[in-house]
Amino acid sequence: MKSAEKAQTESELIERLVGINRVAKVVKGGRRFSFAALVAVGDGRGRVGLGSGKAREVPEAIQKATEQAKRNMFRVPLREGRTLHHDIVGIFGAGKVLMRSAKSGTGVIAGGPLRAVFEVLGIQDIVVKSQGSSNPYNMVKAALEGLRGMESPRMVAARRGRRVSDILVRKKDKSDNVDVAAE
């Protein structure tokens, strides 16, 4: 029973190749080339993982990276299953990534390596700005560091021992003078 469930969840995973690098090692007879792959894996419903693998051939490197990404998966709480609950900044090394929640219909506004991560995560509306390092490894790891710190209003309420409605900020809508809940 357990193995059937695991096989079903494995088949539902989305895999995206974020980047591939050719690496050379200089030895007595010349250069030895190998390949390093960076892969993002997710279920499209809030789980994501990142893996890197290195091998003499490209397919082997991708396979190693995919296996590592599956082991490193974690859950990110999403608002309405399509965007973030709040704006967040992730930092890793010299890379800094600013992620902002967006209205429905905005789409994924993110560059190269980050787009792959948000697609496998299942985020449909987000605005991302990468600052500092443009190295795909640093950019993606910075984004994942930020996403690890993401908290839903329910998690914050539970930690503080309050109700979710106490956590959400109320602000007046200028057109109707009606209270609108904002997250």
Image: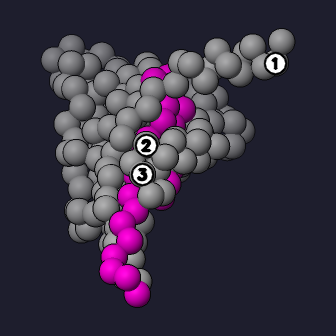
Q: As shown in the figure, which amino acid type bears the numbered disc 3?
A: Glu
* Pointer 2 with pointer 3, Cβ within 8 A: yes
Q: As shown in the figure, which amino acid type bears the numbered disc 2?
A: Pro
Q: Is residue 34 magenta?
A: yes
Residue 59 tag number: 2
Foreground pick, 29 / 58:
29
Label 1 residue SS: helix
Q: Which residues are magenta?
A: 28-54
- Residue 149 left/right relative to 161: left
What residue is at 49 percent from the left and 31 percent from the top? 42
Above or below, comparing residue 139 to residue 65 in the picture = below
Report which residue position mark 1 lands on. Answer: 2
Above or below, comparing residue 152 to residue 57 in the picture = above
- Residue 157 left/right relative to 93: right
Toward which corner of the image does residue 35 lie, by quadrant? bottom left
Report which residue position mark 3 lands on. Answer: 57
Count the marks: how many?
Answer: 3
Foreground pick, 51 / 62:
62
Foreground pick, 106 / 60:
60
What residue is at 64 percent from the left and 43 percent from the top? 71
Q: As shown in the figure, which amino acid type bears the numbered disc 1?
A: Lys
Q: Residues within 10 Å of mark 2 (few under 14, many from 20)?
A: few
Q: Split into 4 quadrants, where in the image is the N terminus?
A: top right
